[in-house]
Amino acid sequence: MTKLSYWGFLSLNALLACAASIPSASHRNCQRSLKACPDGTVIVSGTNLKAHFSTVQAAIESLPHDNSSHTILVLAGEYTEQLNVTRPGPVTLLGETSHLTDASKNQVTITWAQANQDSTGQSVDNVFSSVLVVAPTLESSYTGSGTTGYAVPEDTPFGNSDFRVYNIDFTNTWADYSDGPAHALSLSRANGGFYYCGFYSYQDTVYVGKLGNAYFYKSIIAGQTDFLYGFGTAWIQSSDVLLRNCGGGITAWKGTNTTFENKYGVYIVDSSVKAANASIAPDIVGQCALGRPWNSLHRSIYANTYEDGSIDPAGYIDWVVDGVSRLTSDTFMAEYHTFGPGFNATGRASTNASIVLSPKEYAPYNSPRKVFQTPDGKAGNIDWIDWQA
């Protein structure tokens, strides 16, 4: 349902024609006050009569399917809907807030309650549970089943070149425990940056699919079972990874064979991994694994990150199916300069699942520039990251 523009003399088409992505230095003022937003900003609110749309998805669907840049400001409130972004051009979602640099005080929440009850993943795909999906096509967003996942057609185009979100929480409210895959985010074949955002679920909270690049800055990611998983590349910078309970591992990555050497994986850097709250902390001491290999090409690294007492002394664990280990010489489940009560050197040395890296071994992975790649394998794909957030 549309609402009247507060630029009454402008038609919606004219608004979209002049819309442009807001420079990072100025979007902060827009988040604090409608009056500070530049002409062309699309406004969403369920209650404010100055808004153009009452749902975020309606605002997204109003944008042309081209390479132009657009910004949507979502006013404070809770929105119960699923979001789907397929357009190739840059899109910025801003959440109204009085606390620009504190994700724990976000004032905009997008919620959806759905999980995948098909344990095989063959008849129903995990993507249908997602609160937010960013991918060029439905097929390209499929998780698929087994250790190789869905075979995305080779002629599938790359999707959004620069998708950004600031100060918005995405919460899958299906259950308050692991009850099947329940995505807060699914991102495939796209570049996505998430700044001061929150992602809340229990199982499979964040999925970064094939050729997906996701950068998280000062955000909160909460879950219980395999809640950072996928095929693509995720860099989690200066963020909080919250343990709502323990199950499987925190990370469960599936590497993908390609014709070029890749750096696909999940990197948790300068962050903290800890119990979600004081009530759950005593129940999960030493119980949570850093990760397990969804297939043998799993790659994840925790670097310069605090680990509380919830972490299993062994760190990572194997994933054994029908008596067969998924660990091989290609599996790369590692830590570099992690610290806190969750790091146990003796425990790590007792298993062949966990790797503790030297500075030289960590060097090939120590910056986003080295791990984010273009679809054809070129390193340095970072122009879409907001370094000023």
Image (spheres, grey):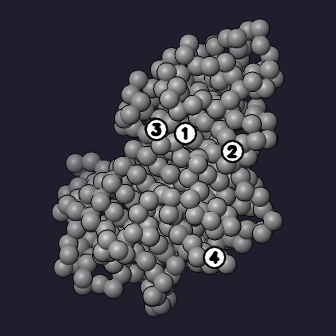
Viewer-nearest of discs 2 and 1: 1
* Whether residue 177 can be seen here: no
Q: Which residue appears at 37% of the width and 70% of the height?
A: 362
Question: Which label belongs to residue 85?
Answer: 2
First in residue order: circle 2 vs circle 1 = 2
Q: Which residue appears at 59% of the width and 47% of the height?
A: 384
CB within 8 Å, label 2 to label 3: no
Judged left or right of residue 375, residue 389 is: left
Viewer-nearest of discs 1 and 3: 3
Which element type, helix, strand or loop, lies under badge 1? strand
Which residue was labeled with disc 1?
165
* CA–CA distance in space, label 3 to label 4: 32 Å
First in residue order: circle 3 vs circle 4 = 4
Q: Which residue appears at 44% of the width and 70% of the height?
A: 364
Q: Nearer the viewer, residue 312 or 120?
A: 312
Give percent across and percent down for residue 150.
Answer: 68, 70
Give percent across and percent down for residue 344.
Answer: 20, 72
Question: Which label belongs to residue 388?
Answer: 3
Give percent across and percent down for residue 371.
Answer: 51, 64
Which residue was labeled with disc 4?
260
How many labels sit on residues?
4
Q: Amino acid at mark 4?
A: Phe
Viewer-nearest of discs 1 and 4: 4
Judged left or right of residue 79, residue 196 is: left
* Whether residue 231 can be seen here: yes
Image height of 276 relative to 75, above or below = below
Q: Quadrant of the N terminus?
A: top right
CB within 8 Å, label 1 to label 4: no
Image height of 238 relative to 257, above or below = above
Q: Amino acid at mark 3?
A: Gln
Viewer-nearest of discs 4 and 2: 4
